Image (tube, helix red, strand yellow):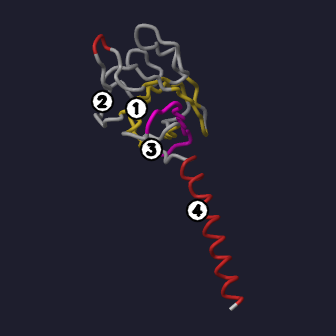
């Protein structure tokens, strides 16, 4: 009887330890999207107001002609929004200079929406968190170097 209760207690303790560790692993690591390579980008989106909808990220290369233009992106990917921080991950084509634009698609419209005068209606942000004044930032204000292995960028969302 004593052996059975000891085994039950030990099994319960192991189960609780496993449950306590699981959320940390799941929350701290986003599954990387895209074709695996030697270069991985982690995007940490801060200031997310709710768990509603999706966080959409767009990756751009170092070409100002293609920055924020239709079909100018290298990759678009989405993750479920998680407040207050959403972790995202994408495999990059290789080392280089990149920029990321992010928006909180709370209504799952699958597009970036704007209101009167072109003002965004959703939370949005850019790599390097540039100061914005009457329009989107330049490519130079948002680019960052990515090296072989892991690169992490932190983006602070701005809500209208």
Marks 2,3: beta carbons within 8 A: no
Q: In 3D space, how far apart are the residues under numbered discs 3 and 1 (Cα atoms)?
A: 18 Å
Check disc 2: other Cα within 10 Å, few if <14, some if 14-19, many if 20+. few
Residue position for label 3: 33
Q: Which residues are magenta?
A: 35-50
Mark 3 secondary-structure assignment: loop
Residue under the image location 60 percent in, 52 percent down: 24
Horizontal side of 153 relative to 112 (left or right) equals: right
Residue position for label 1: 104
Q: Earlier in the sequence, mark 3 or mark 1?
A: 3
Which is nearer the eye, 101 or 1? Answer: 1
Q: Earlier in the sequence, mark 2 or mark 1?
A: 1
Asked if residue 135 is positioned above or below residue 86 in the image, the reply reads: above
Q: Earlier in the sequence, mark 2 or mark 3?
A: 3
Residue position for label 4: 19
**Whole-percent x, y for residue 53 in the image:** 36, 39
Asked if residue 31 is positioned above or below residue 155 in the image, the reply reads: below
Mark 2 secondary-structure assignment: loop
Mark 4 secondary-structure assignment: helix
Residue 138 within the segment the image draws in magenta: no
Marks 2,1: beta carbons within 8 A: no
The number of numbered badges drawn on the structure is 4
Q: In 3D space, how far apart are the residues under numbered discs 3 and 4 (Cα atoms)?
A: 26 Å
**Whole-percent x, y for residue 99 in the image:** 49, 24
Q: Earlier in the sequence, mark 4 or mark 1?
A: 4
Quarter of the C terminus within the rendering? top left
Marks 3,4: beta carbons within 8 A: no
Asked if residue 3 is positioned above or below residue 97 in the image, the reply reads: below
Residue position for label 2: 111
């Amino acid at each position: 009887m004593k052996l059975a209760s000891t085994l039950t207690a030990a099994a319960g303790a192991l189960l609780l330890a496993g449950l306590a560790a699981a959320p940390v692993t799941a929350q701290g690591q986003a599954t990387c999207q895209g074709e695996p390579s030697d270069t991985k980008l982690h995007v940490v989106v801060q200031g997310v107001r709710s768990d509603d909808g999706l966080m959409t990220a767009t990756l751009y290369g170092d070409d100002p002609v293609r920055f924020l233009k239709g079909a100018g992106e290298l990759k678009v990917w989405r993750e479920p929004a998680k407040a207050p921080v959403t972790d995202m991950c994408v495999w990059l084509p290789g080392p280089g200079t990149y920029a990321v634009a992010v928006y909180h698609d709370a209504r799952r419209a699958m597009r970036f929406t704007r209101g009167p005068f072109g003002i965004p209606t959703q939370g949005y942000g850019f790599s390097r968190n540039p100061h914005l004044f009457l329009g989107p930032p330049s490519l130079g204000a948002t680019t960052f170097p990515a090296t072989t292995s892991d690169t992490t960028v932190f983006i602070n969302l701005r809500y209208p």
